[in-house]
Amino acid sequence: EGRLIEMRLKGTSSIVTGGGKGIGRAITLALAREGAEVAVIAKSDLRSAEATAREVCELGSRAIPLQADVTQKNAVDNMVGEVCKCFGKIDLLVNNAGMNIRGPLEQVAEEDWDKVVAVNLKGPFLCSVAVAREMIHRKTGGNIIHIAGASAHRCYAENGAFGPSKAAVINLTKQMAVEWAKYKIRVNEVSPGPTMTSHTEERIQNGEIRRRIAK
């Protein structure tokens, strides 16, 4: 918090999916502190996106809260169009939206597998393609960041479809980086470790789980 804010992103516009809570909120506010305009995307809890957008405005930047299901192409295309209408361009996309349905692998229902893979893998694909098309059309280049996670690199018990879907995001990142480099679009992934959010708080506060994480 005490570091020098250099406003390195002044004049740029960003999209953060799942930007209203947890890691997404932290990313959104960090972008705003550096001067970026931010579209805060939520699937259903628009109030959280609106609250985070207000925090962005309090930091002196612009923000718009938008509702969009990242697993639906029409919803994604409409969201990208709305951001372009409001900000005029898109410089950065952060694919942060994700979900997990925990349980032993042999008990994972097919519909739960499909839900997790749709949000964690299909979502970044749809959002990235829609944004990349805008960047290619405008010849502006840009940056796309996928949030993968520690589960993309190593296996944890009862992580169901989450780990495999996040591991696939790493390969998706490489594929996009290779194909879109000629358009000056950089694609990278970030792999946070266990992080205290509203989704993980109850689990992380479990003494035994907390000890394992700390170790």
Image: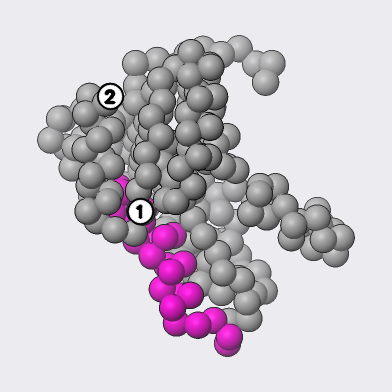
Q: Residue furthest left?
A: 137
Please say which color scheme the image uses: one colour
Percent position (x, y) of residue 141? 24, 31
Which three-letter amino acid code belongs to the residue tagged 2? Phe
Residue that appears at 48% across and 75% down: 112
Report the residue marked by disc 1.
70
The magenta-colored residue range is 106-128
Residue that appears at 50% across and 40% down: 47
Report the residue marked by disc 2.
87
Q: Is residue 113 above or below residue 202?
A: below
Q: Main secondary structure of the magenta part?
A: helix
Residue that appears at 41% across and 73% down: 114
Percent position (x, y) of residue 54? 50, 25
**Left or right: where does residue 103 sit relative to residue 36?**
right
**Left or right: where does residue 26 sit relative to residue 178?**
right
Which three-letter amino acid code belongs to the residue tagged 1? Val
Between 24 and 182, the one lying in front of the other is: 24
User: On the image, which quarter does residue 71 sit in?
Assistant: bottom left
